[in-house]
Image (cartoon, grey):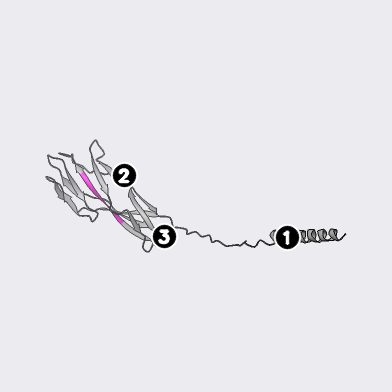
Amino acid sequence: MFWGKIMHFRSTKAFGAFGAVLTILAVSPACASTGNGDASVKILRAITVTKSADLYFGKILPSASASTVAVAESGGRTCGTGLGCYDTSTSGAFHVVGTSGEVVSVSLDSSTATLSDGASHSMTVDLGTSTASLTLAGGAGDFNVAGTLNVGANQADGTYTGQYSVSVNYQ
């Protein structure tokens, strides 16, 4: 009988300790923790791009040889060999409006444009801008477009026009 009481006491004690461990594991997660995260967004103003000046090469007197006329972003012009250049040239100029302090990328949609007299005569313009990006200080910024006009030998007289496109995007 004494032996039975010792066994009962040991099995009750062992079961009691095991039950306590199970209860602790099931009831209180000792290593659990919680945290909070933040969510945010910045809404940007839609970008608008407005032309403020045309790329204008001036008036050109062609020669018997093909040559070029270059207008820099500053508006300065270099008249090629044999050509006569008259009138004041201007670089293409654009005004950008968007969210203040944001950086935008600037690119030409094509590096060339074709100018035509509306008949069968044309010339190509190689376009460029050194402004790959700009910061919209006060919500606005400006950039210019330069061009090199390829004038053919004995180019036919007339007024030649064409278009080019620029793209401005938030970075």
Name the N-terminal-most of marks 3 and 2. 3
Q: Which residue is mark 3?
A: 99
Q: Position of residue 53 (x, y in %)?
A: 28, 54
Q: Position of residue 95 (x, y in %)?
A: 33, 56
Compared to residue 143, the image places residue 118 above or below, namely above
How much space separates mark 1 and mark 3, taking CA atoms? 59 Å
Q: Position of residue 130 (x, y in %)?
A: 28, 53
Q: Which residue is mark 2?
A: 110
Q: Nearer the viewer, mark 1 or mark 2?
A: 1
- Which region shows up in magenta? 143-149
Q: Which residue is mark 1?
A: 23
Q: Quadrant of residue 16?
A: bottom right
The residue lying toward the viewer, choosing from 106 and 120, is 106
Q: Position of residue 12 (x, y in %)?
A: 80, 60
Q: Type of residue at label 3?
A: Thr
The C terminus sits in image quarter: bottom left
Q: Type of residue at label 2?
A: Ser
Residue at the spot 33% in from the left edge and 50% down from the top edge? 107
Is residue 113 shown to the viewer in this render? yes
How much space separates mark 1 and mark 2, taking CA atoms? 73 Å
Q: Residue furthest top?
A: 120
Q: Type of residue at label 1?
A: Thr
Give the secondary structure at mark 2. Answer: loop
